[in-house]
Structures are given as C-alpha cells and as structure tokens.
Image: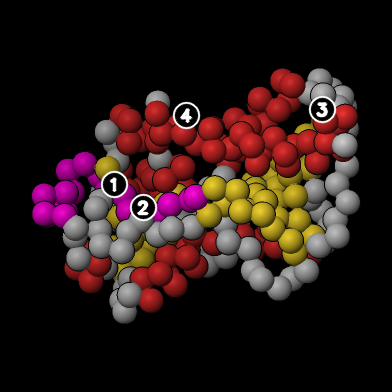
Amino acid sequence: AMKELKGTKGGHLIVSVATTANYFVTQLLAEFSRQHEGIHVTLDVTNRHMLLDQLENHEPDMVIMGEPPKSHGLQSERLMANPLVMIAPPNHPLTNVPPPISLADVMEERFIVREKDSGTRSAIERHVHKHGTSCKNMLEMRSNETIKHAVEAGLGLGIVSMHTIQPELDSGRLVMLDVEHFPIQRHWHIVMRKGKRLSPIAQEFKRFVMQEAPRFVKNLAAR
Ligand code: PGA
C-alpha cells in the first residue's frame, strides 16, 4: 500500500519540530517538497513544552523532538542519535587541559542554557545530576542561535545538540570540549498521538524522514 502512495501530489502537511531539529528538518522539507509538487506545508519550530501542548490539542500531524514522555497517549518511533556536546570558544583555557576534562571541574564554569521548558535543558540537568554534580552559574537564553553567539563571544560554555553547530565547527568559531560523561546520548523521535490516522502526504513524509534523516545529518557532518 505504501508503494501506491509514492509521488502523492498536493495535500497539507502540518509538522512541528524542536528548535534543535530545525537545522536538518528544513533541509528534509526542501527535498520532500521538490519531490511533491503542490504540497502545502505548515512548519512550527518550538520547544518541548509547546510541542507536547500541540500534540495534546491535535494540532500537528506529527512532531520531531527529543525523548518523548512515556505517558500522554503518544506513540513514537526512534529516528536517530542526537548527541549533546559541550562547546567553547577556541581560545578557552579548558581547550589546553589534557582530555577528558573532569565533569566536576567543568561544572564550576558559567553555562549558557535554554529556558526551563526546553528538552535540551532538562536532559542536561538530569544527566549532570546523575553524575553527582550540578551547574551553579547559569545564564538563560531562549534560542540555540543566541546560545551559540554567546558562547562564541566568551560569555560561558554551552551544551547543545551536535546537529546545530556544524557551520561553527567548520569555521573554527566554536570547538567541542572532550569532557568525561560526554556527549549526552539522546535520540530524535517522530511522535504523534496514539491512533492518529495520517493523511497520505503525512504518511509519505514520515516514511521519507525515517529513511532520509540520517543521511542529512551525515551530510552536515561531512561538510
Ligand atoms: P528543545 O528541543 O530543547 O528545543 O525543547 C529538544 C527536545 O525536544 O528535547
């Protein structure tokens, strides 16, 4: 039945994604819309808390996000790895410390972190807590772009999805720090409401994402 759907024309696709998935999802959408003339796409890019609200309210066909909650009447499929890495400006003193840098030591630094409703933020807090430490000096910002700029400017360290920093790594504006217990291993998921009946175009998009997303991230890494 899947085969017959190939090349579906038209239709309205409503997708919401985590702010950190934005980077590869826009590339996926560009390719998908080249293959499907006349589709109408509504894309929203927001944080974990808002994504769960939207699912609750039956708004999007599907959501691409980090680890979804177990309850909530949701069904999810694991898409691919989403490592969270620690970033610093290239001239930071910690780049001269023999790796791996101790987690307890690095937690003495100031960190630029996302807002409380962010999935990235809660993953970081859970992870460092599990390893018996916490971040005392935090500066909060609502966007990944702002965090990257702040880290570049020397305001503090950051912990972000590796899928959001390739251009900065390539150009040498940011470096990844080799810290013990890092990267934090997370995964992207495609999430929808339990029993959701997808339109043909939404089914096709989901299949496309499951198949193609890892390639788009690899392209990013190989650039
Ligand atoms: P967020 O995205 O940090 O923008 O909420 C990641 C996630 O969904 O976990």
**78 vs 217, nearest the viewer:** 78
Q: Earlier in the sequence, mark 2 or mark 4?
A: 2
Is 94 covered by the magenta stretch? yes
SS at circle 2? strand
SS at circle 4? helix
Labels 1 and 4 touching (C-beta < 8 A): no
Distance in Å between CA atoms under marks 2 and 1: 7 Å
Check disc 1 and report the residue beneath it.
176
Residue 198, x across and y down, in percent: 85, 47
SS at circle 1? strand
* Label 3: how many Cα within 10 Å (few below 14, some 14–19, many 20+): few
Is 97 left, or right, of 118 in this rendering? left
Q: Earlier in the sequence, mark 2 or mark 1?
A: 2
SS at circle 3? loop
Q: Earlier in the sequence, mark 2 or mark 3?
A: 3
Q: Earlier in the sequence, mark 3 or mark 4?
A: 3
**Residue type at tag 2:** Val
Q: Which residues are magenta?
A: 81-99
Distance in Å between CA atoms under marks 2 and 4: 18 Å
Check disc 2 and report the residue beneath it.
85
Is 92 covered by the magenta stretch? yes
The answer, for residue 12, to whether it is visible in the render is no
Check disc 3 and report the residue beneath it.
6
Check disc 4 and report the residue beneath it.
219
Labels 2 and 4 touching (C-beta < 8 A): no
Is 39 left, or right, of 68 in this rendering? right
Residue 44, x across and y down, in percent: 69, 45
Labels 2 and 1 touching (C-beta < 8 A): yes
**Residue 103 position by quadrant:** bottom left
